[in-house]
Image: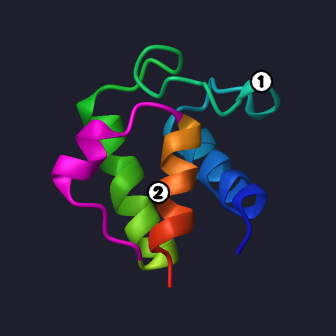
Amino acid sequence: MKKEQWKGRVVGILSGIAPDVEPERLGDETDLRQDLDLDSMDLLNLVEAIHEQFGVAIPDADASAIRTLGELVGYLDELAP
């Protein structure tokens, strides 16, 4: 899967977790915590949804280090089956 495909899928998940998110305004530099106002429960839901939909488990240490949408997409691109 290409990075743009990953990004589209992750944005879809984010839209379900944070309905106020405007997908067309999300870029690689979008900060998941600050720009989208995601709290720890939202981030946990995001990681769980990624695992369920893509089969990619993100360890807690890695999840806490991921700050931006671009970092998350890059992470998935490297680890995905």
Mark 2 — residue? 75
Q: Amino acid at mark 2?
A: Tyr
Helix, strand or loop status at disc 1: helix
Helix, strand or loop status at disc 2: helix
Q: Residue furthest left?
A: 61
- Residue at 50% x, 32% y: name it: 68
- In which image quadrant can residue 1 be found? bottom right
Q: Residue furthest bottom?
A: 81
Instruction: Pick whichever of labels 1 and 2 is earlier in the sequence.
Output: 1
Q: Amino acid at mark 1?
A: Arg
**65 w.r.t. 13: above or below:** above
Nearest the camera: 78 or 20?
A: 78
| Mark 1, other Cα within 10 Å: few <14 / some 14–19 / many ≥20 | few
The nearer-to-camera label among 1 and 2 is: 2
Residue 25: mark: 1
- Residue at 50% x, 67% y: name it: 78
- Residue at 50% x, 62% y: name it: 76
Tell me if residue 60 is in the magenta stretch: yes
**47 w.r.t. 42: above or below:** below
Left or right position of 71 against 63 = right
Tell me if residue 47 is in the magenta stretch: no
| Mark 2, other Cα within 10 Å: few <14 / some 14–19 / many ≥20 | some
Q: How many numbered circles does the render carry?
A: 2
The residues tagged by marks 1 and 2 sit, at their Cα atoms, a distance apart of 21 Å
Left or right position of 43 against 79 = left
**29 w.r.t. 11: above or below:** above
Q: Percent x, y for residue 21?
A: 64, 27
Q: Percent x, y for residue 65?
A: 28, 38
- Residue at 35% x, 49% y: name it: 45
Q: Which residues are magenta?
A: 56-68
Q: Percent x, y for residue 72?
A: 49, 48
**62 w.r.t. 53: above or below:** above
